[in-house]
Image: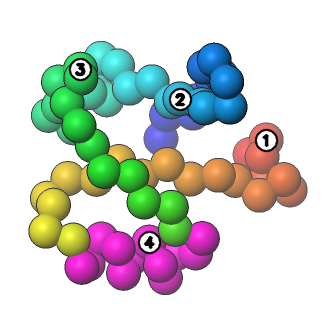
């Protein structure tokens, strides 16, 4: 798993960059629209994926404070 940090854009927005092999694996081009959902639990994430008509997903997880350095 690749570790990244959320970067700050202007204002209150943030971004996570995909580049190189990550972007190639996702089979997407720069500027292509994507859909973003926020899941507050594994169960919700599974439900979003299972009920989606999309074939590829980027999974971004936020470690708990306790597990942030592992």
Label 4 to label 1, Cα distance in Å?
A: 23 Å
Residue nearest the viewer, comparing 7 with 5: 7
Query: At which x and y percent is residue 22?
Result: 31, 29
Residue nearest the viewer, comparing 37 with 50: 37
Nearer the observer: mark 1 or 2; the answer is: 2
Label 1 to label 2, Cα distance in Å?
A: 21 Å
Label 4 neighbour load within 10 Å: few <14, some 14-19, many 20+ = some
Label 4 to label 3, Cα distance in Å?
A: 25 Å
Residue tagged 1 = 69
**Residue drawn at point x = 27 percent, y = 43 percent:** 34
Query: At which x and y percent is residue 68?
Result: 77, 46
* Magenta-colored segment: predominant secondary structure: helix
**Residue drawn at point x = 63 percent, y = 17 percent:** 10
Label 2 neighbour load within 10 Å: few <14, some 14-19, many 20+ = few
Residue stretch in magenta: 40-51
Tell me the element at label 3.
loop
Q: Is 32 left, or right, of 21 in this rendering? A: left
Residue 18 in which image quadrant = top left
- First in sequence: mark 4 vs mark 1: 4
Tell me: residue 9, above or below residue 57.
above
Query: At which x and y percent is residue 50?
Result: 26, 78
Tell me the element at label 4.
helix
Tell me: residue 3, above or below residue 48.
above
Residue tagged 2 = 15
């Amino acid at each position: 798993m690749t570790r990244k940090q959320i970067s700050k854009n202007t204002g209150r927005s943030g971004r996570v960059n995909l580049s190189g092999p990550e972007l190639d694996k996702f089979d997407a081009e720069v500027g292509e629209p994507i859909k973003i959902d926020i899941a507050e639990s594994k169960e919700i994430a599974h439900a979003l994926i299972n009920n989606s008509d999309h074939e590829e997903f980027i999974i971004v997880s936020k470690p708990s404070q306790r597990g942030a350095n592992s």
